[in-house]
Amino acid sequence: MRLALAEAGAASAHDDVPVGAVVVRDGVAIAARHNERELSGDPTAHAEVLALRDAAAVVGHWRLTECTLYVTLEPCLMCAGALVNARIGRVVYGAIDPKAGAIASLYQVCADARLNHRPPTVGGVLAADCARLLTDFFADRRI
């Protein structure tokens, strides 16, 4: 999660919301990305989606069953769907997202019995550090 936090910090350099994601396979980080929606103009350029794309390229296929995604903020509905579709092995997130979270807050996509893949999830890892990045980012913009 500390790698994801470091990655999140890079997002604010181009005015993107500081969310970082790291994909780990066999104890090795194979992809690390941060939000790039403002930088790229792409509404799907969330840290999780970008990290999944990079990880799939490293692994050589789209099934990431042997991987864990670490992300600083609870994934949104789009990202939770991407995690299910990528068959990610496990999801670990930091801060909860009461406005858009789709792992535990608003929806429980990864636990939905109607879906063909339900990765285990762990929330609240370094939550205070992850939340502080976001709080500071938005506080600076509201002054």
Image: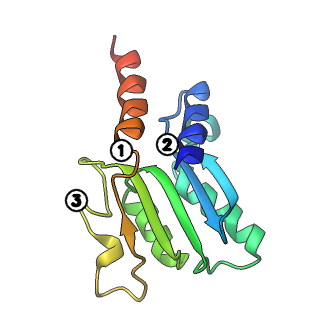
Amino acid type of the residue that numbered disc 2 sits on in the rendered structure: Val
**Residue at image coords 49%, 42%:** 19
Q: Earlier in the sequence, mark 1 or mark 3?
A: 3
Label 2 residue SS: loop
Mark 1 vs mark 3, foreground winner is: 1
**Residue 28 found in image quarter:** bottom right
Judge the density around disc 1: few (<14), some (14-19), many (≥20) Cα neighbours within 10 Å.
some
The x and y percentages for residue 116 are 41, 89
Amino acid type of the residue that numbered disc 1 sits on in the rendered structure: Ala
Query: Which sits in the foreground, 74 or 24?
Result: 24
Decide: marks 2, 1 in contact (CB < 8 A)? no
Q: Earlier in the sequence, mark 2 or mark 1?
A: 2
Seen as rendered, the residue at the extreme front is 27
> Which residue is label 1 attached to?
127
Residue 32 vertical placement versus 116 (above, below): above
Judge the density around disc 2: few (<14), some (14-19), many (≥20) Cα neighbours within 10 Å.
many
Q: Earlier in the sequence, mark 3 or mark 2?
A: 2
Disc assigned to residue 106: 3
**Residue at image coords 57%, 34%:** 11
**Residue 123 found in image quarter:** bottom left
> Which residue is label 2 attached to?
19
Mark 2 vs mark 1, foreground winner is: 1
**Residue 101 found in image quarter:** bottom left
The x and y percentages for residue 113 are 28, 86
As measured in the structure, the alpha-carbon distance from the residue carrying label 3 to the one carrying label 2 is 19 Å
